[in-house]
Image: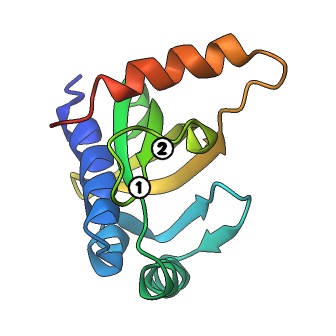
Amino acid sequence: MNTEPIQKLHADLLTYWNNQDAKGMTSLFSEMGNVVGFDGSQMNGQTQIETEIAKVFANHKTASYVWKVEEIRFLNPQVALLRAIVGMVPPGKKEVNSERNAIQSLVAISENEIWKISLFQNTPAQFHGRPELVEKMTAELNKLIKP
């Protein structure tokens, strides 16, 4: 099965974030899509997702994502799971802030042959008690930063 549309969905989501475009981000979700944020906050449905993300962008100059897709797996022809590692580069900086490393999971569904995000979860990758894993992930993500 073709993984490109799933990979593009994730890339578009993070690119919209990097451009602080709440409406663009929301357009990628199914009507009843869900988000579980880095801090555990939950957003349910397109209206809430757009409202909450727009508030974030209105009040903060957010860090930019860098990412690496680790796996795309089809659960059936209309449902796919994407897993990625991500880091965030704070405004004005040139390296990933290791405290914001995360593992992202995205469940995509095909609606009338258009892939949409059903669930997006952003989980901190702090690897408690294993600082070498944080360092390894940060080094890997820093290699993805474009000069």
Q: Is residue 144 left or right of residue 132?
A: left
Position in image of residue 32 (x %, y %): 52, 71
- The image quadrant where one finds the N terminus is top left
Q: Identify which residue is drawn at 33% across, 68% down.
A: 25
Q: Residues within 10 Å of mark 1 (few under 14, many from 20)?
A: many
Position in image of residue 112 (x %, y %): 24, 58
**Residue 59 versus residue 70: which sits nearer the camera?**
59
Q: Is residue 64 above or below residue 8?
A: below
**Residue 23 versus residue 138: which sits nearer the camera?**
138
Q: Are marks 1 and 2 in contact (CB under 8 Å)?
A: yes
The single residue placed furthest to the left in the displayed view is 147
Q: Is residue 53 above or below residue 142?
A: below
Could you tell me how far apart the alpha carbons at marks 1 and 2 are, in whole angstroms?
7 Å
Q: Identify which residue is drawn at 52% across, 42% down.
A: 97
Evaluate whether residue 83 shows in this view: no
Position in image of residue 47 (x %, y %): 48, 86
**In terms of secondary structure, where does tag 2 sit?**
strand
- The image quadrant where one finds the C terminus is top left
Q: Residues within 10 Å of mark 2 (few under 14, many from 20)?
A: many
**In terms of secondary structure, where does tag 1 sit?**
strand
What residue is pinned by disc 2?
Answer: 106
Q: Identify which residue is drawn at 17% across, 36% down.
A: 146
**Which amino acid type is shown beneath numbered disc 2?**
Leu
**Which amino acid type is shown beneath numbered disc 1?**
Ile
What residue is pinned by disc 1?
Answer: 117
Q: Is residue 106 left or right of residue 147?
A: right
